Amino acid sequence: MTQPRAQKIPLQAGRTLRLVLGDQLSDDLSSLTDVDPATDLVLMAEVMAEASYVRHHKQKLVLISSAMRQFADRLRARGVPVRYVRLDDSANSHSLEGELRRALAEAGLFERAVVTEPGEWRLAEVFGALQETLDPPLEIRPDRRFIASHRTFAQWAEGKRELTMEFFYRQMRRQTDLLMQDGKPAGERWNFDAENRKRLPPGIARPQRLRFPPNDATRAVMAEVAERFPDNFGTLEGFDWPTNHAEADAALDHFIGQILPNFGDWQDAMAKADAYLWHGLISSAINIGLLDPLEVCRRGEAEWKAGRVPLNAAEGFIRQIIGWREYVRGIYWLKGPDYKHTNALAADRTLPWFYWSGETDMACVADVVSETREHAYAHHIQRLMVTGNLAMLLGVHPDQINDWYMVVFIDAFEWVELPNTHGMATFADGGIVGSKPYAASGAYIDKMSDYCKACRYDVKQKLGDDACPFNALYWDFLDRNAKRLRDNHRLAFPYKTLERMEPAQRAALRAKATETRERLGAVKLAP
């Protein structure tokens, strides 16, 4: 399937209707660069199709609608006319296509409609079809808020057997000149990841985070979401995310000035009852357009150049954005809508209920789920090595765990969520994104967190009623997927360990893993 055409239509005299989506709240959005306040009209619409295509966390619904309303006010302050359709508007058609057609019918004559390309395939297909039928013509413009265009990524990927993020990241470094000196990477190394895996020292003081009490616009949306979506996952009481450009700028200032210096050392660490630690908490603001990702990176680089941030922190932070973020977006569009239907490990089990309730004796899982319910957030290692790792070890079907990630996180949009979950966390794509499954036993969680100290399970035991569930599940995962994974050079050591085990021990681990899957509620899906 091809993407809809992002084409140039000759500029015409007359009015232009400009549709702005809920994750496109950027002043320099391509669909707004030539807006004429004297003739044009901006359309923004809260529609049920977007509010319910997954059962979004309540805080995500609040963030998007509040930020949209405040961005509409920001445009109006510039003198730009805005037609804003709220979710409770009695005439709301509840689809973006319907609201675009309704505006064209009701708001006067327009010679064209303009939109910046959407971030997800489902909307790309809608707008691609509209290009064939809409009168006046619809222009779909490229989203230039990303560094790598679809063409740039496709050219980089062409002919490669392996689409290794590290090499794409180096291209992005050269293209942006970030952390480069005389054509070479600062510090003579591209990647300082090996220095970014430290465990938290006991008793270390954790940073205080700048948070944002709900303003009037946000409080109004909170009341509407509570009334209209009472059964959606999550709570609203702790909502304190930035919902406008000023708040997002303040969040970035605080992170860059106060948090970034130690981000490098402890970005992979986890701690009970602390979902934030030294993480940026700006991904949601970037993903909906309140912050420009390249400018964010240049701010981080400037702190390193000024000597206020060590290189491993600046590099690790910048890599997350111009490396990983750009890379997963490229994979999403390169592989197309069929990517989500791959299931390389033939996973065939249901997602346990405790992913929603948090009711489990596994301290790490209970903590991550409860923090996610309260904040719509968990940092990348909690997502990868706790909830994602466990789902993979249990054999949860990709559709079920992908849907969970889309629901529960405030920064989740399919272009960023799917390659992270489907590729990195669960290896369902068979190795397109990750060169190996990120499978781990309880030992990894014990090394990188304080969860195990308070857990009712014993992280050092593999068998018995008190054994950490991750342990038998890990060895069974390797055993039952040996045909597929044994030749992966990055798994050579654990497979050698597995092969040295006595047959009786391997059989006991398989039996324990089977019992654990059933007990935890990861049961076989109906054929």
Image (cartoon, rainbow, N blue to C red):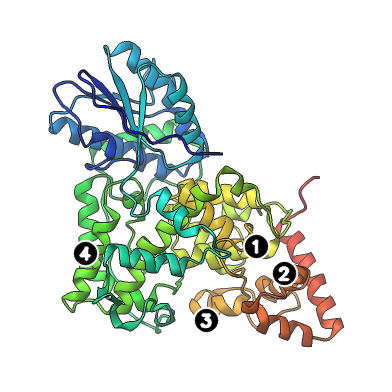
- Inspect this view and state whether residue 200 appears: yes
For residue 57, which numbered disc appears in the image? Answer: none
Sequence-wise, which precedes: disc 2 or disc 1? 1
Q: Quarter of the image containing the N terminus?
A: top right
Residue at x-position 23% and y-position 22%: 12
Residue at the disc numbered 2: 477
Q: CA distance from mark 2 to mark 3?
A: 21 Å
Secondary structure found at label 1: helix
Q: CA distance from mark 3 to mark 4?
A: 32 Å
Q: Is residue 312 left or right of residue 424?
A: left
Residue at the disc numbered 1: 392
Please state the horizontal and vertical placement of residue 104, each as a whole percent of the image: 33, 16
Type of amino acid under label 4: Arg
CB within 8 Å, label 2 to label 1 = yes
Please state the horizontal and vertical placement of residue 372, each as a whole percent of the image: 47, 55
Residue at the disc numbered 3: 447
Secondary structure found at label 2: helix
Q: Is residue 271 left or right of residue 317?
A: right
CB within 8 Å, label 4 to label 1 = no
For residue 299, which numbered disc appears in the image? Answer: 4
Type of amino acid under label 3: Lys
Residue at x-position 33% and y-position 17%: 103
Secondary structure found at label 3: helix
Please state the horizontal and vertical placement of residue 174, each as a whole percent of the image: 31, 67
Q: Quarter of the image containing the C terminus?
A: top right
Q: CA distance from mark 2 to mark 1?
A: 8 Å
